[in-house]
Amino acid sequence: MTANTPPRTFHVKSFGCQMNVYDGERMAELLVADGMTAVDERETADLVVLNTCHIREKATEKVYSDIGRLRREDGSTPLIAVAGCVAQAEGAEIMARAPQVRVVVGPQAYHRLPEMVASAATGARETETDMPAEAKFAALPKRRKSTPTAFLTIQEGCDKFCTYCVVPYTRGAEIARPFADLVDEAKALVDGGAREITLLGQNVNAWAGENAVGQAIGLAGLAHELARISDLARIRYTTSHPADMDDALIEAHGSNAKLMPFLHLPVQSGNDRVLRAMNRSHSAEGYLKIIERVRAGRPDIALSGDFIVGFPGETEAEFADSLALIDAVGYAQAFSFKYSPRPGTPAATMDGQIAAEVMDDRLQRLMAHINRDQLAFNRASVGKRCTVLVERRGRQPGQWLGKSPWLQSVHFTDEANIGDLVEIDLIDAGPNSLAGRRVG
Ligand code: 5AD
Ligand code: SF4
């Protein structure tokens, strides 16, 4: 592309959480609505959007190496736009450090991407990191096509201020999208081919709104209303905070048949002193009580969590409490992270920062417990019959890949189509997937 030529093709590369994936899809839809064409390879795209993540250090470092790698063999670069949470947190620094970046746009302002790109194509450099989240959603085009599994952002931002976390700074205050907009978007996704919708939010279970008759409802009520969309077969949600697991939501896991038996409920640590230092507003026991109540209503529910090892001041005995909590829950899967000091967060300047070797060792030990339980959960599924939503082709000839209700990857080789919900007998289990056979 030469200077002053408006870009015709684009490539969006998203890092980080599922909400970033959702944002990446919406940015692509905006650019298509603006007359541009999406291409699979960034090497041939006139415009490359790097949709970045700021949650941990490694994610941030990646941005600068990625910008560097966009230089092509002939020395040219595409028009580069940096979006997402690094853009929000470090927009000015990116503009100063990387002169080849022409556009910096934060997660609440990307509805302005097309006009910013147009302006950048005439030689300007554009930065927008304002945070009017409602304005963004109102400005996005109607959704048309969808994959069988779709994301729908219902809530954004965070008011909880866990002391390690950048999200309240990069995504701003908690906002809930209005009920009617969500029903419209869900219907559009289902009309476009979605059979499963994952409701997204940094604190998705803090969503609150009013239904069509003006009743105050929470996430359980929203899931109940969405379940009335007949061609929508499955509803999931992520990520939840223990403080917002209200009675209605716990109850919904036992009563809403379309709400899948899976709950991602981060706890971060099994030790109450560490939880307090993290400003988590719940104890280890309070967390376990919630799990117990969810299981009482839905005994087969698969549980997932997030853990941070090496939070400032974490002693060996406090770390051992995290292992004990894992043993008590028996997770179907879980994510674990080494604590990463994020600029501007309270924990980054706390005393007792933990040495890298100690963190490595704790992460290995914690992951061993999680992996053990994940394999056990998968093995315990062998012999069950369940519905699998077919998502894509597998690597072996004739193979299909899909998800069980418990979010396990399942592969099988019988006849099927993408988007089918098929009855499967689970016949074998590994640490990361299960083998199945179609019933009949
Ligand atoms: N360091 C390490 N892990 C973090 N997370 C969030 N912030 C940090 C940090 N500074 C983890 C938490 C959260 C998940 C999305 O990322 O476990 O639940
Ligand atoms: Fe990363 Fe958090 Fe931003 Fe998601 S919201 S992209 S996890 S920093």
Image (spheres, rainbow, N blue to C red):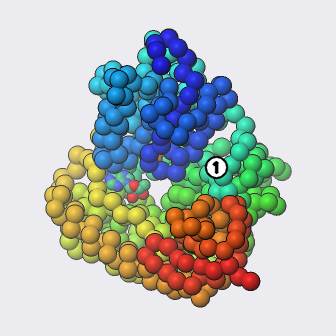
Q: Which amino acid does label 1 sit on?
A: Leu
Quadrant in the picture for residue 386: bottom right
Q: Quadrant of ligand 1?
A: bottom left
> Seen in the image, is 326 located left or right of residue 131?
left
Position above or below: 221 against 379: above
Q: Can residue 338 be seen in this view?
A: yes
> Seen in the image, is 238 located left or right of residue 351?
right
Q: Where's residue 284, x and y in %?
A: 40, 72
Position above or below: 126 against 405: above
Q: Which residue is drawn at 57% across and 72% down?
A: 411
Quadrant in the picture for residue 307: bottom left
Q: Name the residue under label 1.
A: 152
Position above or below: 234 against 372: above
Q: Where's residue 401, x and y in %?
A: 58, 66
Q: Which of 422 and 165 is in front in this view?
A: 422
Position above or below: 422 against 49: below
Q: Residue at x 19, y 54 (%)?
A: 353
Q: Where's residue 408, x and y in %?
A: 54, 71
